[in-house]
Image (cartoon, helix red, strand yellow):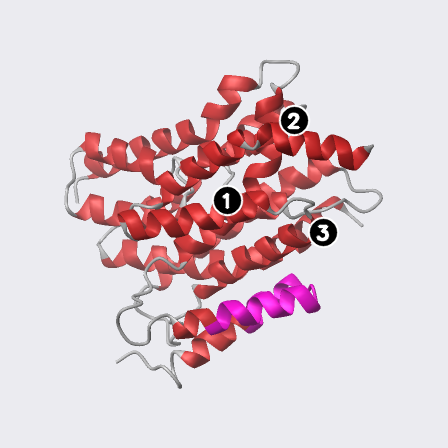
Amino acid sequence: MNNGYTLAVILIAAAMTALTRILPHLAFSRRAELPQTVSYLGESLPAAIMVILVAYCLRSIDFAAYPSGIPETISVLVVVLLQFTLKKTFLSIVAGTAVYMILIRTAFPLL
Amino acid sequence: MRTQTFALKKILPIVPSYLFVGIAYGILMSEAGFSPLWTLLSSVIVYAGSLQIIMVTLLTSGAPLYLVAVTSFFVNARHIFYGLGMIERFRGQKLRFPYMALTVTDETYSVLCSMGPCPEGVSPKDADFYVLLFSQLTWIAASVAGALLAGSLPVDLTGIDFSATAFFVTVCVDQWRKSSSHLPAIAGAVSAVAFYFLLGPEDFLLPALSASLIVLLLLKDRALLQKRRDRA
């Protein structure tokens, strides 16, 4: 492996990632008072972003082919149900992931 | 409760996904022939899971540097949206501010959004900092462990990456329960589904984020009016 190239790739990736993380702060943090629109977005965007992130996590499901996302759907429902009723985040995650890992080994084995 | 203990409790939900994805990334790097030191460097200064994994492919295929730059920017452009929500919150962090702004990831952003009120004796500003620091340390440790252990892990962990999805689902549920308006969540869901079908699974993320941003801007006056009415 060419060390110079590897270093260059990592440095560029780091710089571009840093840019995406620092841009909004560069644009607004010097102002004493945030524009009303920006603080409104800061409050309302997270809920929209989270839903989209879930969709992004599930993007590789192939609905047209077996098992058509059934194990994912069941596991997501388990998480939603547990989180709505018991409100124990860690438990919901561990249980949902366990259900998923069991489903893809038993009821819906990947061929 | 000590601030550090509180922060550790708050990052617990993301630890499974950080451990698994980190280990998987370290293994990929080692299998591609990179020394664990490169894995360490990437996890310290890039610190973005999906991009780091994509970088393995870029590195092994000898991708031109401009392509690395463009890919990095677009894969991580969603961070711009996260930053918008943290401007107010990170004020007054002084010397810690640059580190904090640079360590907001999908997971840590969600933890920060779902933290709720701090117990007595815990400073919210310190808690935010330790959440970010401990999360990155977890990520670094997992990826380096994966790089060192490559080839000698005996258990089949296929499917454990579902823990990341599960975590984001719990954050959605919590936000749904505590927010007075469900419009943002619905806007996100509709945009995600619409652009998934329009553009396919690999290209819908940024258009969906942008569309929800626009929808929320269009609904702004209504939302602010509603809020004032709720207060009155």
State which tag comes first along the sequence, 3 or 2. Answer: 3
Mark 3 vs mark 1, foreground winner is 1
Mark 2 vs mark 1, foreground winner is 1
Q: Give me the chain letter of mark 2.
A: B
- Residue range in magenta is A74-95
**Res. B73 image quadrant:** top left
Residue type, label 2: Gln
Q: CA distance from mark 2 to mark 1?
A: 32 Å
Q: Secondary structure at mark 3?
A: helix
Judge by depth and name the residue closer to the eye, B125 or A25: A25
Give the x, y percent position of residue B43. Answer: 41, 44
For label 2, the crowd category at 10 Å Cα-Cα, with few meaning under 14, some 14 to 19 and many 20 or more, is some
Residue type, label 1: Ala
Which mark, by number, is residue B187?
1
Outermost residue toward the bottom in this view:
A106
Residue position for label 3: B5
